Image: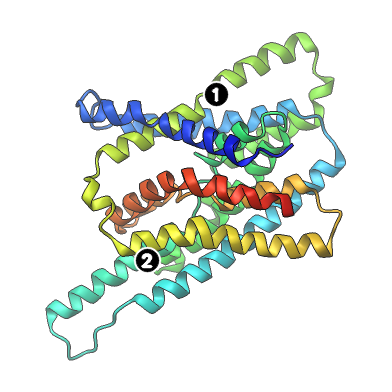
Amino acid sequence: MQPDFLTTLINVGMMTALAIPGFLLKKKNMLPEKAVAALVAVLVFVSQPFITISGFMEKKYEPALLANMGIALLFSLLFHVIVYFVAKAVFFTLTKRADGDADDETKEKARVDAWQNKACTVASFMGNAGFMGLPVMKALFPANPEMLIYTAVINIGFNIASWTLGVYTITGNKKDMGLKRALCNPPTLALVVGLPLFFFNEYIPLEVFTPVSTAVNYLADMTLPLSMIILGIRFADLKIKELFSSAKVYLVCFLKLIVSPLICFALMFVACLIFPALDAYVIIAVFVIMAMPTAALTLSFAEMYDGDRLTVVKSTVLSTFLSIVTIPLLMLLTVFL
């Protein structure tokens, strides 16, 4: 059963409200400077992988489910690439170029403009598949653990697109594109650990499976509050005027929260007409993930490769809060899939 508009709105709204403790603690100077880095480490290396593993442990193996995972991966790769080129085309047309005779000030403005547009392009196609996607999926579909499995697979497509197209966009150097990093990371390793449990969990003795599953769920349940607390801390570092002062950030939010999922919906709708046997939950999982706000990974890229950190932070925070409204509205379209 798919959640209705009100249920989705309440769930997403309550999730975002969990950012308040992080915001208040940061504003009251009760957190050390490296608090975010420590919390992100716990989120990336502990809770997020375990929420993926818990999905595999709650679902028994079915051949159809394995086929659906492959379909989810293909769709994820396809849509991330499509949205990337749409965003690149939009921001490429906005880039101001200075000719060879321009003065130094004009050339510097052109450089900054191009620098911002690279960050905007990355923020427009990289969605929060892991930090927010997994908790949202668990909140909206608590009786469908396969949705967590599909999300984990979709996350692989996101990582491949991010570490190749995303990194190349920021650096402009193909040598920086890291397919190895796209495949060797905590979400993918969680998939590697989870798959054997998925295939053989019915053969594990109940007296062993139950306590292990309970421990995994304890760690998995930290994902949502941790990710939202981190968001609150980052929001506290921004001035409100800065958050709403950039037209380009609004454009990023429009592309990420509206254009991206609508492109996905249109192509998925056609796919459903051509292939009526496609599993509806696979389609919905991909659609929901494409509707997620800008990924926190974009901030890591900006810091690692000397990108426009401020634009990325504003895009991440603003798109996350706007998604409280856009995700429930977009969920109304799922009745047609």
Side of 272 relative to 333 (left or right): right
Q: Is residue 300 visible?
A: no
The residue shown at (27%, 25%) is 25
Mark 1, residue position: 221
Query: Which corner quadrant of the image does residue 176 belong to?
Result: bottom left
| Outermost top residue | 207
From the top left corner, tell me how far across and down residue 134 is, in percent: 58, 37
Side of 2 relative to 184 (left or right): right
The answer to whether residue 168 is above or below residue 33 is below
From the top left corner, tell me how far across and down residue 244 is, in percent: 28, 54
The residue shown at (61%, 21%) is 216
Mark 2, residue position: 118
- Secondary structure at numbered mark 1: loop
Q: CA distance from mark 2 to mark 1?
A: 35 Å
Query: Which corner quadrant of the image does residue 201 belong to?
Result: top right
Disc 1 residue type? Asp
For the C terminus, the quadrant is bottom right
